[in-house]
Amino acid sequence: MASTLTRDAETATPKTPRHGVSSTQSVLRRRLLGRPRTAKERLWAWLGPAIVTVLGGLPRFWDLGRPHQLIFDETYYVKQGWSVIRNGYELRVRDTIVQGGSTFNVPGDHQGQVADSYFTNGLHPTAYGTDADLVVHPPVGKWMIGIGENFFGINDSFGWRFAVAVVGTIAIYLVGRAAWHLFRSATLATIASVLLAVEGMEFVHSRVGILDIIVMFWALAAFVAILADRDYARKRLADKVAGMRDAGTFIGSNRLGGPRLGWRPWRWVAGICLGLGTATKWSDGFYLVAFGLMTVLWDLGARRAVGVRRWISATFIKDAIPAAFTMVGLTIVTYLFTWTGWFRADNSYQRHWAATHPANQDNGISPDSSLFGWLPDSMRSLWQYHVEMYNSAANITSFHEYMSNPWSWMVQARPTSYFYESPKRGQQGCDVDSCSKAITSLGNVSIWWVATVALFVLLFFWLLRRDWRAGAILGGIAAGWLPWFMYQERTIFTFYAVTFAPYVVLAVVYICGLVLGKETDSAERRRVGRLVVGGYVSLAVAFFVFWWPLYTAQVIPYRQWQLHMWFPSWI
């Protein structure tokens, strides 16, 4: 199918208009949305990614409970997920262990290990103490993990990871929908889904019960929503302006030229998704900024394209202000709603802090904390909790063997090892002297390395060719990547890049679209393009198969594990 990276000329003569669509509508729709796609193209834009999603979901759910033990940061989120389901807030793990009718103190640096053992061996009821815990992330991701635990039982490690497998699988479909909205090509939409299905970091996070893929999922859902809003708004604008022109009432020189577009339901969806994402990790707040700017800039271009001369003021009043109220407002409301469990509990962390810290005293909220006196005590207590959350997260600066600088993330210079064991002959199916059993969060380098080059191509097409698609993809990468450069003194890891993995995939798909060629290219040129893109996608799948043992904790000979460690920094 044809690539749609090439623009249809805004002045192209439209085909015979369909029934019920005037000639003016047809011209404006084509100018704002490009060539109309056929029913067959639209059908395959749904079916292609859907089929890939089913196929990509199978390996994500296969043997999901392997290994049956808490790995890496599951030590926090699996326990906290179960706690919020049972209590509405997070409890600290106990500092004592009950064994044989006797109680023993557990040193602080071993408390997590003891609780891990309790969960692995089905002794979770005794893993928690009675005190609320200070945590550094909001509750939504833990609620989602906890729902899976509640559904399958806390003793089932499949349940620990069920939620992340669900969102990791749905993301395959969502990235296909994003590609369709961007490129209007069912082929490129399907390729996008295939590439995310075999993207190693996304795959590993679909099988490990931690928060980052949930952060990625809600941001991606919001991205698809604002892309859908772009189509909805432009069609609505074209139809309204066409009606005004046909009636002779359109005056593009008006200060607030062009019609109001009314309710924008997809913006509501985006705001709610961003609220849920921010309530998983605050880093999704950067996507609110990026996507908010995108949607307003798209409106700006649309009003200019239909002939509004004072398009800046018109967009600001009729589009930007409503967008701010809708997206920012819904994000905040949704975020606060997710703290319902904390509000309802009596013993949640700092729940009654405000009662002992009157607003007219210097209590650490601000130099003049009386400014917060108008807030209810519950909200002032929540604010103080957030201050402590931020300070606690900002002070995570201790050395970790797998910490990495964000400069290295795109080239996957230092992937994170989540789990490693060295079975010997006769152990866990090892039939040689020494084996390896590992889970490594290594991105599919055939995707990430190409995407690193693609960044420069995207910058060229965005800045010099004014291609909005290149700008949208760059915005998604920037929102997930650039903020970490402000926190280089913190202990941070390459796997944080999973939040912008979908946009890395879309960057590669953009290159695939260029290689496939334009609809007007010769048959030979397009045949060569299909061969090159088909070969590349096959290579990406082959790389995924090659690293499969290191994504899924398979027991392999140690020598075979070494063959996967291409660089010393990967070890």
Image: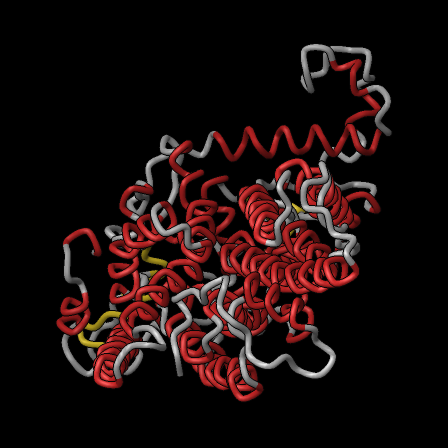
Residue at (47, 45) in percent of width and height: 479
Q: Is residue 252 left or right of residue 100?
A: right
Q: Is residue 569 left or right of residue 122?
A: left
* Furthest residue in direction bottom, as rendered: 40
- As drawn, 293 above or below 209: above
> Can I make out residue 101 in this image?
no
Instruction: Pinpoint residue 4: horizontal percent, then vertical percent.
Output: 42, 71
The answer to which of 519 and 405 lies nearer the viewer is 519
The answer to which of 100 and 431 lies nearer the viewer is 431
State which quadrant residue 261 falls in. bottom right
Residue at (15, 80) in percent of width and height: 432
Instruction: Pinpoint residue 400: horizontal percent, then vertical percent.
Output: 33, 42
Residue at (68, 66) in percent of width and height: 147
For the image, the number of numbered tags is: 0
Q: Is residue 228 left or right of residue 483?
A: right
- As drawn, 153 above or below 466: below
- In what quadrant of the picture does the C terminus appear? bottom left
Instruction: Pinpoint residue 154: horizontal percent, then vertical percent.
Output: 62, 68
> Can I make out residue 273 in this image?
yes
- In what quadrant of the picture does the N terminus appear? bottom left
